[in-house]
C-alpha cells in the first residue's frame, strides 16, 4: 500500500559495466558490476525473480540493453 521510493545508487559508468552472472548447473543468477580495466567482478545482489531484476535496474538506473550476461 505504501511503498518507499527507491533511491538510485550511482556507480562509475566509465570503469564499471553491469553484468548478470548465471550458473549453468543451478540457474542461480547474480547481478553486479565488472571492472573494465581489471576484469574483477563485484556482486551486488542475488536475482531470484523478475521483481529482483526490476529492483536492480531501478536502483542502479540501468537499462536491460546495457547488461551483459556471463555463464
Image (cartoon, grey):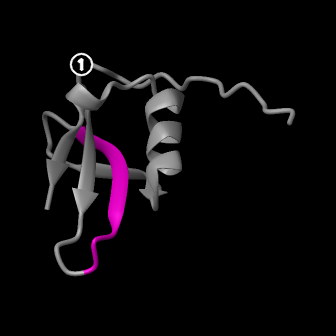
Residue at figure coordinates x 13%, y 34% from the top left: 37
Q: Residue at x 24, y 42 (%)?
A: 34
Q: Nearer the viewer, residue 24 or 18?
A: 24
What x and y, as percent, mark residue 57?
A: 43, 32
Q: Is residue 51 left or right of residue 71?
A: right
Q: Does 44 appear in magenta? A: no
Instruction: Tell me the SS state at disc 1.
Output: loop
Q: Furthest-bottom residue in view? A: 25
Q: Quadrant of the N terminus?
A: top right
Camera-side residue: 35 or 50? 50
> Which residues fall within the magenta stretch?
26-34
Name the residue rendered at 36%, 58% in the picture.
Answer: 30
Where residue 53 sits: x, y (%)?
44, 45
Residue 33 belongs to magenta span: yes
| Residue 38 in the figure: left or right of residue 30 | left
**Residue indicated by mark 1:** 14
* Disc 1: CA contacts within 10 A as few (<14), some (14-19) or many (>=20): few
Which residue is nearer to you in this view: 33 or 69? 69
Q: Residue 2 is drawn in which quadrant? A: top right
- Residue 29, relative to residue 33: is it above or below? below
The overriding secondary structure of the stretch rendered in magenta is strand
Q: Looking at the image, which residue sits at the far right?
A: 2
Q: Residue at x 35, y 22 (%)?
A: 12
Amino acid at each position: 500500500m505504501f511503498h518507499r521510493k527507491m533511491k538510485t545508487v550511482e556507480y562509475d559508468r566509465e570503469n564499471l559495466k553491469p553484468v548478470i552472472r548465471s550458473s549453468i548447473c543451478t540457474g542461480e543468477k547474480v547481478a553486479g558490476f565488472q571492472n573494465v580495466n581489471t576484469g574483477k567482478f563485484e556482486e551486488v545482489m542475488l536475482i531470484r525473480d523478475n521483481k529482483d531484476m526490476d529492483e536492480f535496474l531501478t536502483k542502479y538506473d540501468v537499462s536491460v540493453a546495457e547488461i551483459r550476461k556471463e555463464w
